[in-house]
Image (cartoon, grey):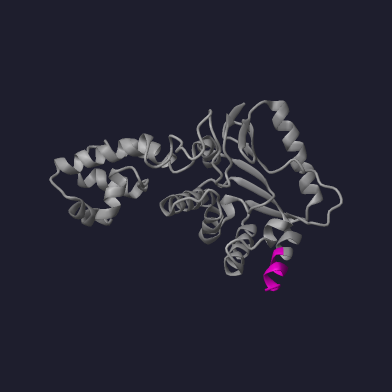
């Protein structure tokens, strides 16, 4: 079992006794992000370019280049590729691209993000929020904007971009099997306001019609409920491993032991039997849209 100390909804917890408010080592401003920024600055200086000139070549403002070099913002992969080419870096910057990309996620979610990106099956149960894989950018922004303590705007932008990037799972050449059970209350909670929620529900309908995706709603009026212990994700990897990812407030864990995973699989099977069918669920979401 691997243990992580934060939750995917954006709530940072103390890790290993870290003081409240202290930046974890994966945040912008530290770690690999700063190392990349220093390397970028050295290469830019070697090329004889100021920030404005280099920004013009790569399509970014001088201020953004400064943020990349100071480790305050995480550069996107397309910038890293372009910078490596423009600075004749010989692959030095590109060699850091994967680690820099991983830094866009909080440390607790990195292992899960890797497993998610490589999964052949994902089965998800959500209670308070619509899952990140199904979120619109506007809904994701509302989620991160609601976080307390407040995130700064750069971090909100980075978290939204990272969440949207995860949704490349829907455009893979070999599509994974995806299923979601979502509590009715999460669909009725208008995070960001009704216009944002309207767009979110429309996206759920779009995903729900994909051949490899099944979305089921757990109605509020069910007298029996197999998932009262909270949300989770079940993962099957390409090599046949089955893993469970569980989040509870300030604690997130990956379970790999077969007995523990089997228990959560049993819960999910019961949940799917108790929820509306996929077709009934899409009809339910359409009715929610018609209420406003």
**Outermost residue toward the left in this view:** 48
Number of numbered discs: 0
Image: 121 above or below 219: above
Which of 141/256 is in front? 141
The verdict on residue 289 being magenta is: yes
Residue 199 location (% of width, % of height): 58, 66
Kindly tell me whether residue 36 is visible in this rendering: yes
Q: Left of 15 or right of it: where is 55?
A: left
Majority SS type along the magenta span: helix
x 52%, y 40%: residue: 113
The stretch in magenta equals 285-292
Q: Left of 267 or right of it: where is 213?
A: left
Residue 100 location (% of width, % of height): 38, 39
Give the image quarter of residue 280: bottom right
Which of 184/173 is in front? 184
x 30%, y 53%: residue: 64
Q: Left of 245 or right of it: where is 48?
A: left
């Amino acid at each position: 079992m691997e243990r992580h100390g934060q939750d995917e909804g954006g709530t940072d917890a103390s890790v290993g006794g870290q003081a409240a408010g202290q930046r974890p080592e994966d945040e912008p401003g530290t770690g690999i992000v700063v190392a990349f920024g220093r390397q970028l600055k050295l290469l830019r200086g070697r090329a004889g370019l100021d920030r404005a000139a280099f920004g013009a070549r790569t399509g970014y403002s001088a201020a953004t280049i400064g943020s990349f070099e100071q480790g305050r913002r995480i550069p996107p992969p397309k910038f890293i590729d372009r910078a490596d080419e423009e600075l004749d870096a010989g692959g030095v910057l590109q060699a850091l691209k994967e680690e820099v990309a991983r830094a866009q996620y909080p440390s607790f979610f990195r292992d899960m993000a890797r497993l998610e990106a490589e999964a052949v099956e994902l089965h998800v149960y959500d209670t308070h929020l619509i899952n990140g894989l199904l979120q619109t950018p506007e809904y994701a922004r509302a989620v991160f904007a609601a976080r307390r303590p407040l995130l700064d705007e750069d971090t909100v932008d980075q978290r939204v971009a990272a969440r949207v990037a995860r949704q490349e799972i829907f455009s893979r050449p070999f599509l994974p099997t995806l299923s979601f059970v979502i509590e009715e209350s999460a669909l009725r909670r208008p995070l960001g306001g009704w216009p944002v929620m309207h767009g979110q529900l429309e996206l759920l309908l779009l995903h729900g019609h994909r051949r490899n995706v099944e979305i089921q709603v757990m109605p509020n009026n069910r007298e029996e409920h197999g998932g009262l212990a909270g949300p989770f994700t079940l993962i099957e990897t390409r090599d046949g491993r089955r893993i469970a990812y569980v989040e509870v407030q300030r604690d997130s864990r990956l379970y790999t032991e077969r007995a523990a995973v089997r228990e959560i699989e049993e819960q999910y099977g019961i949940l799917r039997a108790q929820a509306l069918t996929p077709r009934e669920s899409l009809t339910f979401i359409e009715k929610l849209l018609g209420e406003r």
